[in-house]
Amino acid sequence: MRLIKYILLISVTGSWLHGCIDPYFPDDLKYEKMLFIEARITDEPGFTPYVSFKHSSSIAGYDPWSGQNPWNRPAEPLINTSGATVHVENMQGQRWYFTEENIAWLVPGPWPASGSYYTLTDPDFTLVEGESYMLHIETQDGHIFESQYEKYLPSPPVEEINYTYETWETSETGDATDGYRFYASTRSDDQDPLYLRWSLDASYAYMVPYIASYYWTGSALIDTTNDGRRLCFMDETVNGIFTGTSEGLAANRVINAPLHGVSRYGDRLQVKYSLHVKQIRIPSSAYRFWNDLKSLLYETGGLYETVPFRLSGNISCVSHDDFKVAGLFEVAGVSETRIFVPNPGEFRVVTDRCVPDTIQIFEWNQLPAGSWIMEEVPYLITADRECFDCTAKGGYTGVPSFWEK
């Protein structure tokens, strides 16, 4: 069962987890094939409730030195999950049914031939505060899966996102970096303990260092500047599992739950950094699943220093006791906030170094097309395109609608 760490890592990649761990596949490793069920319903505007099925695939005969990901191979389905009857039910017996979708375009990923995907689009379905819901699935061949009843509670507003200068390890090898470390705090006025996870994405502004005077097309030298390509914006999803709870505390409050860190090396803190935080209030069973998964993946000394165990979700196969299934049904309230972080004053941000190169008139025809040139009298100087054109790093020049003025 040692490989369960990476089986689960791959199974949640689509919408649960975007991790940064390099797996190691020993030759003699074996594990049990499993079905993974992911189901989620939230009060987030525009969110479509879904149920997703994925099957684990064998790595028998996989060559770890080939550079190919064994999980990209279609897995042989354990059961047929297409054409299933899927519904969510409340404590009063009301039911709302899901519709099967075309997984090929809805869920891009490594399960093109062995997964199924269902959505709930009934306009009459609305989460009711304090109500509990249960997921029921019946396949065509008679396998029945059910979740626990899970209570819906809205998420309170995010009270505060703060950050401090710290040094931390960035990988299992012990490499360290320093920069800003982020933390979340929130409180609730109701009596139910808070069980939270946070989903993060970020945007940042960065600027290239050189101001151009000319542009070389490959056949002509144009007198122009790079003013419109010096400042860019970049968007990214923040990888990781971030959880917190007020369980067992005197106050129904979570204080300074650790989020992620942003290194001072690179472009993220060069001009301004914006962190967008979705706070997701989840049932206690979902919280324990996420917390166990986080411990298994990130808080151990490595794959072989972990005592293997099976993560238990809140979905089980009630028709076949011996059928292996791992699944999670989330009924969640969502709130969100965004903060902006200016260029730090207490430490220096280290960006990629640009190395200038002096050029002579007779060397124009040797420059690659698309070269920018700056004038530093009495010299003309060029450098890599990334030093003049911020879009060469993958960013865009349009200011995001949410950007702080």
Image: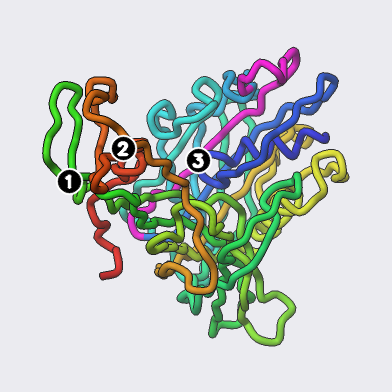
The residue pinned by badge 3 equals: 86
Q: Residues within 10 Å of mark 2 (few under 14, many from 20)?
A: many
The residue at the point 45 percent across, 34 percent down is 107
Where residue 352 sits in the image (x, y, percent)?
Answer: 47, 47
Residue 23: name its quadrant: top right
Which label is found at residue 341?
none
Q: Earlier in the sequence, mark 1 or mark 3?
A: 3
Q: Residues within 10 Å of mark 1 (few under 14, many from 20)?
A: some
Depth check, front residue: 120 or 283: 283
Gap in angstroms between the C-alphas marked 2 and 1: 13 Å
Where residue 250 sits in the image (x, y, percent)?
Answer: 70, 87
Element type at marker 2? strand
Q: Which residues are magenta?
A: 45-69
Identify whether 108 is placed above or below 316.
above
The residue at the point 24 percent across, 56 percent down is 399
Identify whether 323 is placed above or below 18.
above
Report the predominant secondary structure element of the magenta stretch.
loop
Q: Residues within 10 Å of mark 3 (few under 14, many from 20)?
A: many
Residue type at numbered disc 2: Thr
Which label is found at residue 382?
2
Where residue 38 sits in the image (x, y, percent)?
Answer: 57, 43
Element type at marker 3? strand
Q: Nearer the viewer, mark 3 or mark 2?
A: 2
Residue type at numbered disc 1: Thr
Q: Quadrant of the N terminus?
A: top right
Which label is found at residue 225?
1
Residue type at numbered disc 3: Val
Cβ–Cβ under 8 Å for marks 2 and 1: no
One can see residue 337 in this view: no
Depth check, front residue: 305 or 390: 390
Q: Quadrant of the C terminus?
A: bottom left
